[in-house]
Image (tube, rainbow, N blue to C red):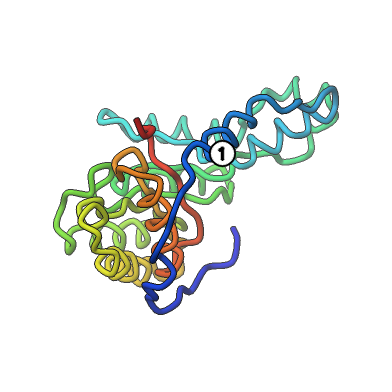
Amino acid sequence: MAAKNSGVTFDESWIKNVNINLPAVKRRAETVTARRGVKKQWQAAWQLRAVSCIDLTTLAGDDTRANVHRLCYKAAHPIRSDLLKAIGMESAGLTTGAVCVYPSRVGDCRKALENMKCKIPIASVATGFPSGQTSFKTRLEEIRQAVQDGASEIDIVINRTLALQGDWKGVYDEVREMREACGEAHLKTILATGELGSMVNIYKASMVCMMAGKYRATCGVRPLP
């Protein structure tokens, strides 16, 4: 994993007077799918690289130990051996970048990976994912428990209520405490962009989380209208 971001002191000037040219953003986004793709062996190389960046995830209400063990096996063997052999990659040791589960399933992941003698990182969604609507004390305890059970990355959800109220110092303070609760584990913030209301808020949320010490962010699941 990349080096951790230790964070900086909150500085409101970083997020003041922000303007987003939404039509320009949309035009730029549309060019992504229009770009020429790589071909032949380069396409295979990039596809294998993409597999190595995946957080293979199960976040189902009916997750069991058996489900999690199958997930870990798939993470350790993401591509069929005959396909890897056909392209000369059978000895590359290809795995996914991580496995991701709820905090209550981290221990199952750790045991499964230990049994396979596989060192794939374990990520865990915490802090009341996906809504974040639990007490702050409970959210911090979820982080500590997941780390104690073996998670090396914690995926938090930010407090959208504070963000929508413009309380960016409040968002910073919460993420900062979550960063501390992670200890040696990496912190990833899930911004839930579809619930932030505007591109300006998305920008501010990302900047505030970087100030607080996150090392990467994801957008969430719902697009802006």
Residue at position x 78%, y 33% in the image: 45
Counting from the top left corner in percent of width and height, residue 163 is at 27, 55
Image x and y of residue 165, in percent: 20, 56
Judging from the image, what secondary structure is the residue with disc 1 in? loop
| Kind of residue indicated by mark 1 | Ile
Quarter holding the N terminus?
Answer: bottom right
Quick check: can you spot residue 15?
A: yes
Q: Nearer the viewer, residue 57 or 4?
A: 4
Q: Is residue 151 visible?
A: no
The image quadrant that residue 213 belongs to is: bottom left
The residue positioned 46% from the left and 30% from the top of the image is 70
Q: How many marks?
A: 1
Q: Residue at x 38, y 29 (%)?
A: 67
Instruction: Give the residue pinned by disc 1.
Output: 54
Taking the view exactly as shown, the residue that stands out farthest to the bottom is: 9
Q: Please state if 33 lies on the left or on the right of 154 as rendered.
A: right
Percent position of residue 187, x then y? 43, 60
Residue 28 versus residue 119 in the image, above or below: above
Depth check: give the residue in front, 104 or 49.
49
Crowd class of label 1 (few under 14; some 14 to 19; many from 20; radius 10 Å): some
Left or right: residue 132 versus residue 8 is left
* Rendering quarter of residue 135: bottom left
When the figure is inspected, residue 140 is found, relative to residue 124, above or below; the finding is below
Residue 31 locus on image (x, y percent): 64, 30
